[in-house]
Image (spheres, rainbow, N blue to C red):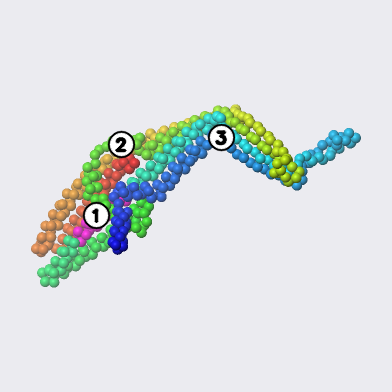
Amino acid sequence: MKSKFYIIALLLLTKVGVGQQSFSLKEAQDYAIEHNQKVMNADIDLKIAEKKVWETTAAGLPQVSGSVKFQNFLDIPTSVLPANTFNPMAPKGELIGVKFGTKYNTNASLQVSQLLFSGNYLVGLQAAKTYTNLSKQLQDKSKQEIKQEIADSYYTILVLKENIKTLDSTLVKVNDLYKITKILVENKVMESVHESQLKLSVLKVKNAITKVKSQLEVSKSFLKMQMGMDLNATIELTDVYENIIANAINTTDENMAVSNNINYQLLSTQLLLNQLSYKNTKANYLPSLAAFFSHQQNALRNDFDLFDSNKNWYPTTVWGLTLNVPIFSSGKRASQVGQAKLEMEKTQNSMNQLSEGLKMQMIQAKAGFDNAKESYETQLVAVNVAKEILKNNEIKYKEGVVSSMELTQVQNQLLQTQTELTNASFELIKAKLAIDVLLNKFN
């Protein structure tokens, strides 16, 4: 019974482990959102901004503080008075020292203050909330950027795997021809130079496979780093490359809304912050009003009996209002208002420039996509032609009509054409990715 339990547990653990290491593009992006350090820091920045709102709000709420002060006068302060104050017979101008106070003094106080009106405070509340929105947008931008980076790395790995498939297929064909040629050479039907030529081709293809596999491992490590995975973990990609290409080819034309672009949204929020800064500098012309309340208890003793309940503590209680009125700043406030207004104009100009720039980027992205699509379709035809040429030359080679050198050239031509097809498909996917970024599809 125990052995069955262990087997079931092992199967479940194996299933979970495999599930954790295999990712579709969306799963890889979702994993990165949870584990990427850059995104995690953006989440922390948002939490800091939310706490900043309360910090700013609390500044206008009642502020309460208390203090206790104990003093032990080793020498009681001395004041100087005219001697004739106590002795009318004392010479005029003679002074005597008199000590006032007690050896032990203790003061316990409670202070309460409340801001009643401040234009800067009211604007500060709005700015703090707007700053939180800015942090949320920066968080969204971090997520969009990491999703885009994950997609780019994901597609790169799939392309490298396609290259390996092409090279593996080529290796099989070249190796088969090499074996056939070797037999023919051994039977004196062909010269050994043909065998050597094909053996060289086999070695070249094997070397190319080794290089691409090395690139694949590096690309996988880079993807794991972006996702926030352990670099020693294994990872497999589940999306089918052919489906991704088909999806790219079937892309429908969509119009871009500039207002949906995260960079434009960030500038819009920056403009709002500039406007609040402008209001804040104008609020410097307004007075501020605050109320305060203070209560103190003082113990004055010549003996260290501060907690003797039979001796008095002397209270002092006061409340009041503080009104601060700005009167004259030699043009400082006017200069601040002018600067804030100019900052608004700069941000508005940046928004207009970004709007036109985004439109231009979309024009370029669509043109790039059309070119990539046409190039991909052309390369599809080229591969079919190259395959037909190779097929005919293989027949002629076996009949002794073409040389091994000519056959190798045709094989290399097919391999080059297939590689160009893979590259063209990658360019098509990247062109589609550029459009998706502009359309804010990684939101």
Mark 2 closeness class: few <14, some 14–19, many ≥20 residues within 10 Å: some
Q: Amino acid at mark 1?
A: Glu
Q: Is residue 278 magenta?
A: no
Q: Is residue 153 magenta?
A: yes
Q: Position of residue 176 (x, y in %)?
A: 16, 64
Pointer 1 and pointer 2: residues touching (CB < 8 Å)?
no
For residue 256, which numbered disc appears in the image? 2
Q: Residue at x 72, y 40 (%)?
A: 310
Q: Position of residue 245 (x, y in %)?
A: 23, 47
Q: Earlier in the sequence, mark 3 or mark 2?
A: 3
Q: Could you give the CA–CA distance between mark 3 and mark 2, rounded to whole angstroms? A: 49 Å
Tell me if residue 18 can be seen. no
Q: Residue at x 24, y 51 (%)?
A: 240
Tell me if residue 271 can be seen. yes
Q: Could you give the CA–CA distance between mark 1 and mark 2, rounded to whole angstroms? A: 33 Å
> Is 256 positioned to the left or the right of 116 in the image?
left
Q: Amino acid at mark 2?
A: Met
Badge 1 marks a residue whose secondary structure is helix
Q: Position of residue 195 (x, y in %)?
A: 17, 67
Which span of residues is magenta-colored?
152-171
As rendered, which of 316 and 180 lies closer to the eye?
A: 316
Q: Residue at x 59, y 34 (%)?
A: 113
Q: Which residue is mark 3?
A: 62
Q: Position of residue 330 (x, y in %)?
A: 59, 30
Q: Which residue is mark 1?
A: 162
